[in-house]
Amino acid sequence: MENKKIAAIALIIAITLSAVGFAYAHWVDYATINGKIQMGSMTLVFDPTELLDYTDNELTLPEPKDVGSGKIYYDTLTRVDDAHTGLYGYKVLVFEIHDAYPQYRIDFTTVVLLNIGTIPIHITGSTIWDPTGVLNWTWTTPPPHSPCEGFFWKDFNHNNVYDTGEEIMHVKIVNFVSHQLEPGENTKGEVDIDFYQPAEPCHTYQFNIEFDATQYEGP
Amino acid sequence: MNKKIMGAFAILIIALSIVGIVYAHWTDSVQIHGTAQMGSITFGFTSIIAEWDSEDYLNYPAEKRTATAICDLKQPVTDAHTLQTAYKLLEFNITGGYPEYWGINKFTLDNKGTIPVKIQSITLTVPKGLDYVETIPNLVWDVYNATTGDYYYYIWLYNETAAVDTYRATHPFAPPWVINNAGYPMERINGTQIDKLGSVPVEMCVVIPETAQICHTYTFSMEIEAIQWNKYTP
């Protein structure tokens, strides 16, 4: 009986000491770093504030006429809003040319690219093609030259190479390639189109022009 | 051995990370979508305005009116843009002709396309054995037998101008040489402009001279070329 008491007391002391000892042995503290990385945005658009317009060569002809005409408008379905800056713009600009004819020239003079993102961007080049595959494109002065220009041609004799007399229309792109745009900055340029004699009456030709940009990478 | 494996692994990681950096460059683009709808040229005839002949001019009695000069329009074409129709062929037929008979047809030259045109050229084609001389260039063609030199018919083609109408107001049915000699020069149709959906009145007169042969049939073909107005060469 005496032995059991002694054993119980020893056990209690051991437990008590271990408890006290535990407390002393685990004093710790913490400092926390919460990281947040908010990426910038890179959004190149056509400037929605620009008043779209065009000019043609008919009033400057020796005998002024009003035959050909154009339309220029934004594809409103391609509107994008930059979540960081709250600015917006359009990804697609549409050109329409009606009743064109050889030697008709139309200049879309209000093509404005706008950087609505948060980082500077660099316009690296432009690509031009016929989405229907009917016309072929040849650069005469390719990007990164600015202005850059070339012409569409149709392989009338199906020999897969350009031959004199197959030119349909000449396209000149002024003042975009190699431009750097700071956030919120825009640049105005134009796209000039001339029709050549082999252009066929009563035909409809299509073309796409893409302006490519990358993040600014330093000087 | 383990070190070699570790080294190769480290190089692979570094290489992939470099490639990853290259691909990770942010890019963006915008596009212009263009459509160029070309205009059209559809040139031809649309109407016969009037037909008369020397028998009308000389006021022949009914029993003496034995010849006719009548036109027909053929080969209709419809412009895809304007959906307007013109005829590519005008047939000018003289029936029962005789020396000193002449017939005039007044008709319209029409542009049913969207691009203005100008008359660039006129080409006369005559059957083998015949030839012609333009006694007034682009206005009067005298057709003759290339062997004998005998003249078979003359063709006048000219604009119906205000001067022509003025003279005819007092001299009904007057033929072109009479008007021309009266001090109202006939105007050739070359260079005449016809705007989009426009129309100009023109007259053709065919004259049969004394040297034409009896009971023969003569044919000719005259092609009138119209060109987009800004490519016209005088």
Image (cartoon, rainbow, N blue to C red):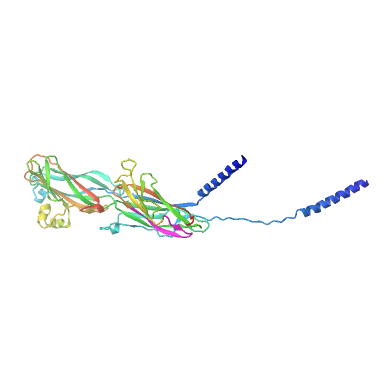
Whether residue B127 sits left or right of residue A85 in the image: it is: left
Find residue B42 and report its horizontal and vertical position in percent.
26, 48
Find residue B96 and report its horizontal and vertical position in percent.
11, 42
The residue located at (38%, 51%) in the rendering is A142
The residue located at (83%, 50%) in the rendering is A15
Whether residue B25 sits left or right of residue B117 in the image: it is: right
In front here: B164 or A197?
A197
Image quadrant assignment for residue B63: top left
In front here: B171 or B147?
B147
Whether residue A120 sits left or right of residue B94 in the image: it is: right
Q: What number of labels is visible?
A: 0
The residue located at (33%, 55%) in the rendering is A106
Location of residue B215 with respect to A65 vertically, above or below: above
Q: Is residue A178 magenta?
A: yes
Find residue B71 and report its horizontal and vertical position in percent.
18, 45
Residue A75 is at least partly visible in this image: no
- The furthest residue to the right: A2
Residue B61 is at least partly visible in this image: yes
Find residue B208 and report its horizontal and vertical position in percent.
9, 45
Location of residue A54 with respect to B45 vertically, above or below: below
Position of the N terminus of chain B, as image quadrant, is top right
In front here: A2 or B163?
A2
**Magenta residues (range):** A177-193
Q: Is residue A202 magenta?
A: no
